[in-house]
Image: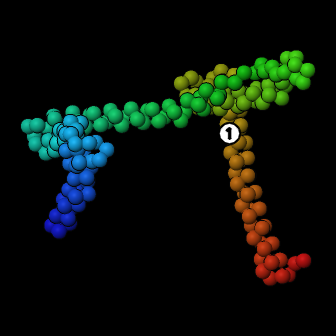
């Protein structure tokens, strides 16, 4: 354990602290020039604050930096969540009334796109009604919408499973044909 601890201290000093903190601090980094970079002193202060967790009297100092990093982590996590989820939420707002222009330039209704959006919206709202647990399902509209949402989800999951099975079977058929035709020469 002593050898591991000693090696860890030396490795931390030579691989992390000297090239990533000490050299940029005194400007020995070619990108920084020859001046003292004061931002790295702030990093030293913030890094030192973590070690106050080991004292009873100054534990509050460590809680400041821990709270700061928890806040930064939460902010980055929320930002990533909204970057990933907001386009999906915005795509769920679809119009049922869609007009397009035909070859002559006049505005006509696009019945195919209108039907697709209507099916999407009915499926979306019925599925959301299935997961809506804040109201009792004693009203017939909500009860039947939730039941339809359950069935629509089962149909969607079945279709996904079916495509997975079909893809695996097509790979299996291809390998069996390779074995029978090319490798064994039994067919053809």
Figure quadrant of residue 145: top right
Looking at the picture, does residue 120 appear above or below residue 184? above
Residue that badge 1 annotates: 153
Q: Is residue 12 left or right of residue 113?
A: left
Looking at the picture, does residue 152 appear above or below residue 101? below
Q: How many marks?
A: 1
Looking at the picture, does residue 5 appear above or below residue 26? below
Quarter of the picture containing the N terminus is bottom left
Figure quadrant of residue 37: top left
- 80 or 153, which lies in front? 80
Question: Can the viewer see residue 143?
Answer: no
Figure quadrant of residue 122: top right
In x, y percent, where is residue 169? 75, 62
- 178 or 147, which lies in front? 178
- 15 or 144, which lies in front? 15
Residue at point 76% right, 26% down? 118
Q: Is residue 15 left or right of residue 183?
A: left
Q: Residue furthest left?
A: 57
In x, y percent, where is residue 35? 21, 39
In x, y percent, where is residue 70? 31, 36
Q: Is residue 180 left or right of residue 156?
A: right
């Amino acid at each position: 354990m002593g050898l591991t601890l000693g090696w860890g201290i030396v490795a931390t000093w030579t691989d992390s602290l000297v090239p990533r903190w000490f050299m940029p601090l005194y400007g020995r980094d070619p990108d920084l020039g020859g001046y003292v970079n004061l931002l790295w002193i702030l990093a030293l202060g913030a890094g030192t604050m973590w070690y106050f967790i080991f004292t009873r009297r100054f534990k509050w100092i460590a809680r400041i930096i821990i709270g700061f990093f928890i806040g930064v982590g939460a902010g980055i996590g929320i930002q990533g969540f909204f970057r990933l989820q907001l386009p999906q939420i915005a795509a769920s707002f679809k119009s049922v009334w869609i007009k397009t222009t035909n070859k002559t330039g006049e505005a006509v209704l696009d019945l195919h796109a209108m039907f697709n959006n209507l099916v999407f919206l009915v499926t979306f709202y019925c599925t959301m009604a299935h997961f809506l647990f804040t109201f009792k399902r004693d009203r017939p509209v909500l009860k039947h919408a939730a039941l339809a949402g359950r069935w629509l989800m089962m149909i969607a999951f079945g279709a996904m499973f079916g495509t997975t099975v079909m893809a695996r079977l097509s790979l299996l058929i291809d390998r069996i044909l390779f074995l029978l035709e090319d490798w064994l020469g039994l067919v053809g």
